[in-house]
Amino acid sequence: MVDILETLGGSLDDVRAFCAVTEFGTVSAAARQLGETKGSVSRRLSRLERRLGVQLLARTPRAVTPTDEGLAFHARAREALNWLDEAAEAARQSKTVPRGHLRITAPMDFGMTALPDLLVQFRARHPQITMELVLANAPIDLAAHRVDLALRAAVDDLPDMGYRASTVGEFRIGLYASPSYLAAAGGAPVTPADLKAHDLVVAREFSGTVQLTLTGDRRKRREVAVRPVVQANDYASILRIAAAGGGIAPVPDLVAAGSIATGAVRRVLPEWHAAEGTLYAITLGGRDAPARVRVFREFVRENLRASHPL
């Protein structure tokens, strides 16, 4: 197919016209099939023969018959056109039929905690889609890494990465601790001020911070001096440390949900949260993305809306 295109350097419609004439036996029949005039088809045939420098058809007043060269060219050209038609149809169907390979990237913490269940549920609904997960805390370029969709969380505005971003969920960073830690510490804190007496396990972004700002009902705010005893560079790690009894950890509810369900941790000071944020789906095509991308984006949005309403 590539050889034909590079050699011809012209319109594929000329090749289609030649194949139609060969297959239908007359210029008139081919013109009707193609929705063109006899003159238009004849000009296409002549143009194609000039470009190739060979006679493809033997013309008589009553018939048009392919030459030996024409028969050989038709066999290869028809195969190439079939390949092109199949490729074009597959490309068109990618807009409407959710199938194919879906390559996703997400932060380590969200990817290690919330995504596994989501991927399994999605695959059960769409078994014709295969999936690949790339976990990376730093944003990666979608086009350069052939990524279909990136899930990114942001407490503030999402940095401009040159791609389409849409909101798929919202989250709050709450405070979580294991039952064993709370029992050893004499009980859960009742007010934000009680955090002063507790060990805190925090993400690296809190490094050097001595004041933890909490927001409660009606947007009331409290600043509390805290005592970080362990720091880590992702929320999945500090959640595991908190679950092991290491202290109280500020963690996004999207990340903590699985550990809450198993009883490994529980929410403390549930009426207070350390921050609010948004989970975005970033894609190359936005609304024009392939169907496999759009259905996954909507699946994540629906699932998070149902399981994590604010």
Image (spheres, rainbow, N blue to C red):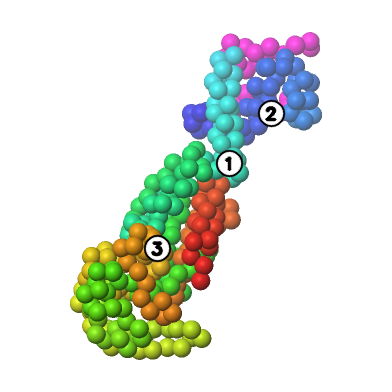
Q: In this view, does 6 lie to the left or right of 28?
A: left
The answer to whether the residue labelled 3 contacts the one labelled 1, judged by CB atoms less than 8 Å apart, is no
Is residue 123 placed above or below 219 in the rendered structure? above
Of the numbered discs 2 and 3, the one sitting upstream in the chain is 2
Marks 1 and 2: which is nearer the front? 1
Residue type at the position of mark 3: Ala
Q: Residue at x 58, y 27 (%)?
A: 81
Q: How many labels does the image show?
A: 3
Res. 147 visible in picture: no
- Return the mark for residue 44: 2
Image position of 146 with respect to 154: above or below? above
Task: Name the image quarter holding residue 239.
Answer: bottom left
Q: Distance between the residues labelled 1 and 2?
A: 36 Å
Q: Does the magenta stretch include residue 62?
A: yes
Q: How far apart are the two marked residues, 2 and 3, measured between alpha carbons?
A: 66 Å
Q: Closer to the observer: label 3 or label 1?
A: 3
Mark 1 neighbour class, 10 Å CA radius: few under 14, some 14 to 19, many 20 or more: some
Q: 106 or 54, which is in the foreground?
A: 106
The dot on residue 257 is 3
Residue pictured at 48% horizontal, 39% vertical: 127
Q: Looking at numbered disc 1 in the image, what kind of residue is underneath it?
A: Val
Return the residue at label 1.
Answer: 97
Q: Which of marks 3 and 1 is nearer the N terminus?
A: 1
Q: Residue at x 43, y 60 (%)?
A: 151
